[in-house]
Image (tube, helix red, strand yellow):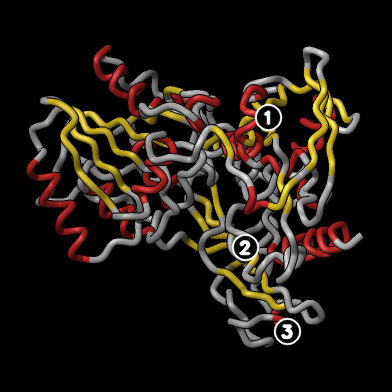
């Protein structure tokens, strides 16, 4: 499947899903299934089938649970490199993957459970069903998602020694930055700060650097950061571009480097160390909350603090890659026949090329203190499990461990890491869309 070839969270489909056009009837099962670890289980169920919730599955329409897990692993989209947390979340929540993305039309599925019992599931139109457990703001995981859309940031005193800084966006204006600075000044004597960058889609790298400057008492380390493209001439695919002229040379300043493929330029934002802010300084211990919803700038912000041993992270791996991502320049393409529009990233933006046990190749920023994804956290828990873990660590006095970067090695540019090729990615993305269309219309 082409989904196995394209691992980039910054590729985007700009037009509606062509397989679900106007007038398409969407059907849903009585039993919604998910994958947790190596097990397939019932995650939600129509009211009358609530007794099935939590039951493990042996097979669906004769396909074994092991084969379902293997197939779904090949269908994952929207993640960078070898990211695990995003895939784990999708497998638990995106029930449609288990059913092969076939939801446009009536169907019946035969579900066999691990205890030998079976259930014949006659699907229903999606607007005629209520599922348990209910999607409610009482569930902390859902509440956090909702609150992240209501405001860009928030400060809340948790106790006498700890303040929570919820940061939901890196798209912040001058007034918002001044309010953050004033809040940090007011909490300067609080010994612990928890910074929550979950449910954060990213934003401006300049905001990252400014915020980092509020927490540093010395310049950040000089990293081997750079920008890389496949070619610095004209791109044939630009004849289908909506934001570039067909003959435009977008990377004339990128230069070849002897012994390396591609063309290179200095990073605009990470080439020089970030200097401490002269007016705002928070010097307490920092615990950053991350998970599969920490994207782009919400990966780079904690990464800069971790790389400089200024914070620890608690939770799960960030969605975007630690070593590099492709959130710099994009081409918007319109395919000539279908008129489907795609957003394709063009630049490999390397943040740090040091591979360590703390920052393994191809992964997002992995937390210092891992909180595994659980059914309870996503569907039922009213307490914030990741925040609770951070508060537990604070109470136990657990903070920085050994410096794993001392024994790291540079090597993200040695050719062993997947080289990001813009045109190849565009073609792979197109192939995936064509395959999806054919599959849905068979």
Residue underneath mark 2: 12
Question: Within the image, what quadrant is residue 235 found in?
Answer: bottom right
Residue underneath mark 3: 239
Across and down, in percent, residue 10 comes to 58, 58
Badge number at residue 308: none
Q: Nearer the viewer, mark 1 or mark 2?
A: 1
Across and down, in percent, residue 265 comes to 52, 64
Up/down of 61 relative to 28, above or below: above
Marks 2 and 3 sit apart, C-alpha to C-alpha, by 19 Å
**SS for tag 3?**
helix
Residue underneath mark 1: 35
Q: Earlier in the sequence, mark 2 or mark 3?
A: 2
Who is closer to the viewer here, 291 or 254?
A: 291
Who is closer to the viewer here, 113 or 223?
A: 113
Q: Earlier in the sequence, mark 1 or mark 2?
A: 2
Within-10-Å neighbours for mark 3: few <14, some 14–19, many 20+: some
């Amino acid at each position: 499947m082409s989904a196995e070839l394209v691992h980039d969270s910054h590729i985007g489909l700009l037009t509606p899903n062509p397989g679900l056009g106007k007038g398409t009837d969407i059907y849903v099962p009585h039993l919604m299934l998910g994958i947790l670890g190596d097990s397939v289980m019932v995650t939600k169920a129509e009211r009358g089938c609530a007794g099935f919730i939590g039951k493990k599955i042996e097979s669906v329409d004769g396909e074994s649970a092991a084969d379902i897990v293997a197939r779904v692993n090949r269908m994952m989209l929207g993640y960078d490199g070898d990211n695990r947390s995003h895939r784990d979340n999708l497998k638990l929540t995106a029930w449609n993957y288990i059913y092969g993305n076939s939801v446009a039309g009536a169907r019946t599925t035969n579900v066999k459970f691990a205890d030998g019992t079976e259930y014949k599931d006659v699907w229903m139109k999606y607007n005629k069903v209520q599922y348990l457990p209910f999607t409610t703001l009482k569930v902390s995981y859902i509440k956090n998602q909702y609150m992240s859309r209501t405001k860009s940031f928030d400060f809340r005193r948790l106790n006498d020694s700890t303040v929570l800084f919820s940061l939901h966006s890196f798209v912040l204006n001058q007034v918002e930055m001044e309010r953050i600075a004033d809040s940090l000044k007011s909490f300067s004597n609080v010994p612990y700060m928890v910074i929550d960058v979950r449910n954060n889609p990213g934003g401006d790298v300049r905001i990252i650097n400014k915020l980092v400057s509020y927490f540093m008492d010395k310049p950040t380390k000089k990293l081997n950061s750079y920008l890389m493209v496949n070619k610095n001439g004209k791109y044939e695919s630009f004849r289908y571009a909506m934001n570039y002229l067909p003959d435009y040379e977008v990377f004339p300043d990128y230069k070849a480097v002897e012994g390396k493929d591609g063309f290179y330029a200095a990073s605009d934002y990470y080439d020089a160390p970030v200097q401490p802010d002269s007016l705002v300084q928070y010097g307490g211990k920092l615990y950053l909350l991350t998970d599969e919803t920490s994207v782009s700038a919400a990966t780079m912000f904690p990464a800069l603090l971790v790389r400089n041993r200024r914070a620890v992270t608690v939770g799960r791996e960030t969605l975007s890659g630690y070593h590099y991502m492709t959130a710099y320049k994009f081409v918007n393409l319109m395919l000539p026949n279908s008129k489907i529009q795609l957003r394709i990233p063009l630049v490999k933006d390397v943040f740090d090329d040091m591979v360590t046990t703390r920052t393994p190749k191809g992964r997002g920023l992995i937390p210092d203190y891992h909180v595994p994804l659980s059914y309870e956290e996503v569907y039922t828990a009213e307490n914030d499990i990741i925040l609770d873990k951070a508060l537990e660590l604070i109470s136990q006095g657990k903070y920085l461990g050994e410096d794993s970067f001392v024994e790291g090695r540079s090597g993200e540019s040695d050719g062993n890491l997947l080289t990001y090729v813009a045109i190849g990615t565009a073609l792979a993305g197109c192939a995936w869309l064509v395959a999806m269309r054919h599959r849905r219309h068979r």
